[in-house]
Image (spheres, rainbow, N blue to C red):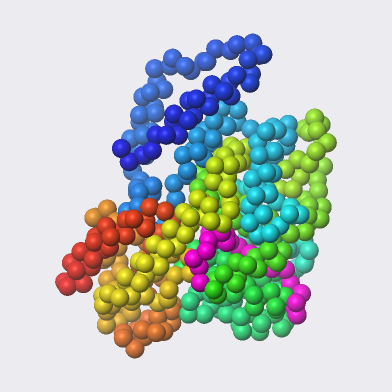
């Protein structure tokens, strides 16, 4: 059995406790309890769901897909029996309180005690809210992000009708500070997005230098740490990367995705603002709804209206079990993922068949097979990717500028501007123990492909 079943047992026992909270109500009959069609439909669903890559398995080392923790699965499912809506306290009293507590624990990772924040559907919505606030405070001014930042920033800027420009990146996929300053000199920039953990290479923008420029040019700094934010808890990143993490708390806004490294089901994002007064920007009036409480409704500080309280319940339960504290179990899981990436990258670099453009900053490794030209490298990468999948090793592909391989460019002909590379996101703690098996399959496949 590969799929865990612990959450099912937890759920069954917890449902009995939840039901005891409503014993004062008249009993109702379960309208679908004995419907014979239920089993048939569920079995059909299960059969259709087999048409998926094994995202939960350590041999899936491709995209950033991480299984939820069993406690998150069980807590999320439990909440759906009530189906709370965290837009207002009327729709989710307990789950709203759990959201506030869980979000405060996330903010505390970055040293924030006074802040404004909430959960949302994911990183895209969280980043939209952060850039919307930036646009309200710096109307009409430009949004800047690295050319290696997530494409959502350009798209969101277009939705918000704010000008956008991409900043050049260095050969490690980080924002080029010199290019940034040239763009700032025009005086038309309202917000700079610093990516702490790019989704392509896991690169961390140089936040110390960006913050120094803010002192001179007066723009907002938004940290998009949707992927990499939780790595602030680990102790095994290098000193340069650590320096950026130590200053995240000086940003004006932060985004982090619990549905990535936070062990949550999709979709669960989080946006945080250092200045709580930005809540006034969200102010709205509703002619109906919420009169049962004078306390702050989460819907009053969110662009989204209806939001699943189940996401908050699952996150609260997970953080209750695995506190967001350095040196504790959750942080150790991240350190294992980071350790796996470092070991894997070293092994690749020491093997004559591969080119590694740079050491990983987090837990994403990018590499490519050696060949006579950039175009041949790309063809070999595609063949290895396809062959590995047939051996149940699922990798990913990424197209990068050839200049990312500046340290190796004398070894192959640069006959095109980009090169297709192999990529692995080693975000499961189990990847550390599975490296030998992953390497064995990759090595066997490479021997078959590269000797043709």
Q: Magenta span covers which residues?
A: 215-238
If the image is split into quadrants, where does the N terminus sit?
top left
Residue at the outermost left position:
452
Where is 395 relative to 418, above or below? above
Q: Residue at image x 80%, y 38%?
A: 295
Q: Quadrant of residue 350?
A: bottom left
Queried whether the magenta region covers residue 100, the answer comes back as no
Residue 123 at least partly seen:
no
**Where is residue 245 drawn, in percent x and y?**
60, 66
If the image is split into quadrants, where does the C terminus sit?
bottom left
**Where is residue 220 drawn, in percent x and y?**
72, 68
Where is 54 relative to 371, above or below? above
Q: Residue at image x 67%, y 33%?
A: 94
Residue 32 at least partly seen:
yes
Residue 8 or residue 288, whichever sits in front: 8
Residue 435 or residue 165, whichever sits in front: 435
Where is 1 relative to 62, above or below? above
Q: Residue at image x 60%, y 38%?
A: 313
**Where is residue 71 drawn, in percent x and y?**
50, 38
Queried whether the magenta region covers residue 224, the answer comes back as yes
**Image side of residue 288 versus residue 352, left or right:** right
């Amino acid at each position: 059995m590969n799929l865990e079943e612990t959450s099912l047992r937890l759920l069954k026992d917890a449902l009995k406790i939840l039901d005891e909270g409503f014993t004062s109500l008249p009993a109702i009959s379960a309208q679908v309890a004995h419907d014979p069609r239920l089993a048939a439909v569920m079995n059909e669903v299960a059969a259709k769901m087999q048409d998926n890559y094994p995202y939960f398995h350590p041999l899936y080392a491709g995209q950033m897909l991480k299984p939820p923790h069993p406690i998150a699965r069980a807590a999320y499912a439990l909440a759906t029996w009530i189906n709370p809506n965290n837009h207002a306290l009327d729709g989710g009293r307990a789950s709203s309180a759990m959201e506030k507590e869980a979000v405060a624990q996330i903010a505390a990772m970055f040293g924030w005690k006074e802040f404004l924040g909430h959960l949302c559907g994911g990183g895209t919505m969280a980043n939209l809210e952060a850039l919307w606030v930036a646009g309200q405070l710096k109307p009409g001014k430009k949004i800047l992000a690295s050319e290696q930042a997530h494409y959502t920033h350009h798209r969101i800027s277009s939705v918000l009708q704010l000008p956008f420009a991409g900043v050049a990146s260095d050969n490690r996929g980080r924002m080029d500070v010199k290019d940034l300053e040239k763009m700032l000199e025009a005086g038309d920039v309202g917000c700079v997005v610093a990516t702490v953990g790019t989704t392509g290479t896991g690169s961390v923008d140089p936040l110390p230098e960006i913050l120094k420029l803010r002192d001179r040019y007066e723009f907002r700094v938004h940290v998009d740490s949707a992927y990499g934010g939780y790595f602030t808890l680990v102790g095994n990143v290098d000193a340069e990367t650590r320096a950026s993490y130590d200053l995240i708390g000086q940003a004006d806004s932060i985004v982090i995705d619990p549905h990535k490294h936070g062990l949550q089901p999709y979709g669960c994002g989080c946006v945080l603002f250092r200045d709580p007064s930005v809540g006034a920007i969200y102010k709205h009036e509703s002619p109906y709804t919420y009169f049962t409480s004078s306390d702050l409704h989460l819907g009053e500080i969110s662009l989204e209206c209806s939001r699943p309280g189940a996401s908050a319940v699952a996150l609260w339960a997970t953080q209750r079990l695995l506190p967001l504290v350095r040196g504790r179990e959750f942080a150790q899981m991240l350190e294992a993922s980071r350790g796996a990436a470092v070991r894997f990258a070293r092994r690749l670099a020491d093997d004559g068949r591969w080119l590694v453009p740079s050491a990983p900053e987090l837990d994403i490794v990018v590499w490519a097979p050696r060949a006579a030209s950039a175009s041949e490298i790309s063809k070999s990468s595609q063949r290895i990717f396809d062959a590995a999948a047939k051996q149940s090793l699922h990798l990913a592909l990424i197209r990068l500028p050839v200049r990312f391989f500046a340290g190796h460019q004398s070894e192959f002909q640069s006959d095109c501007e980009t090169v297709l590379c192999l990529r692995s996101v080693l975000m499961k703690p189990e990847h550390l123990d599975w490296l030998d098996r992953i390497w064995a399959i990759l090595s066997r496949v490479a021997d078959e492909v590269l000797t043709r």
